[in-house]
Amino acid sequence: LARAGTAVRVLKLFGNPGFSRQAACALGRLLAANNSIQELDLNSCRLDEGACVALLEELARRSGPSALRKLNIRVNALGRRGGAALAAAVQKGVLPLLEELSLFSCELGDEAGAEVLEALARRP
């Protein structure tokens, strides 16, 4: 996504139903290797819990911080495990520049929601 001095900063994939675990892994690897994407919109992609976990675990494998400032993953089924994976990525320091996080209608539940909020609160 970066060629000849031009880099993609905004990636909007919203509304792509049935985003598979395989596609989520590939996107996670892209995010782990790319430091130009500042905004990612996955709203309403029907990511299930396994796909969310795969995406966030791949992102957490980054050796350094991500450039992501906005992450929209609303209207996807993150569930408890997806929330835990998001909290782990935040705790690892992969998302230090994150300014906006949209988790509307993500089926996090109380436990995972609290875990994400605690991780965000502990960020430097």
Image: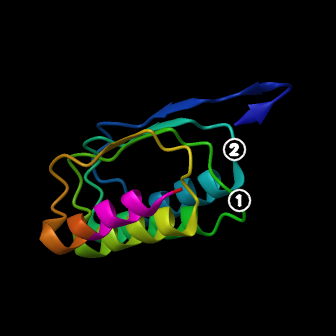
- Residue type at the position of mark 2: Asn
What is the distance, in whole Å, between disc 2 and disc 1 at their CAs? 9 Å
**Whether residue 80 can be seen here:** yes
Q: Quadrant of residue 59?
A: bottom right
Q: Secondary structure at mark 1?
A: loop
Quarter location, residue 50:
bottom left
Looking at the rendered image, the quarter that the C terminus falls into is bottom right
Crowding near pointer 1: few (<14 within 10 Å), some, many (20+)?
some
- Above or below for 52 versus 13: below
Write the start and end of the magenta stretch as one range: 115-123
- Are the residues at dot 2 and dot 1 in contact (C-beta closer than 8 Å)? yes
With 4 as the anchor, is 32 left or right in this view?
left
Residue 60 lies, in percent from the top left, at 56, 67
- Asked if residue 89 is among those painted magenta in the image, a careful observer would answer no
Residue located at (19% from left, 46% from top): 104
Q: Which residue is mark 1?
A: 64
Task: Judge whether residue 116 is colored magenta.
Answer: yes
Question: 24 or 95: nearer the eye?
Answer: 95
Overall secondary structure of the magenta section: helix
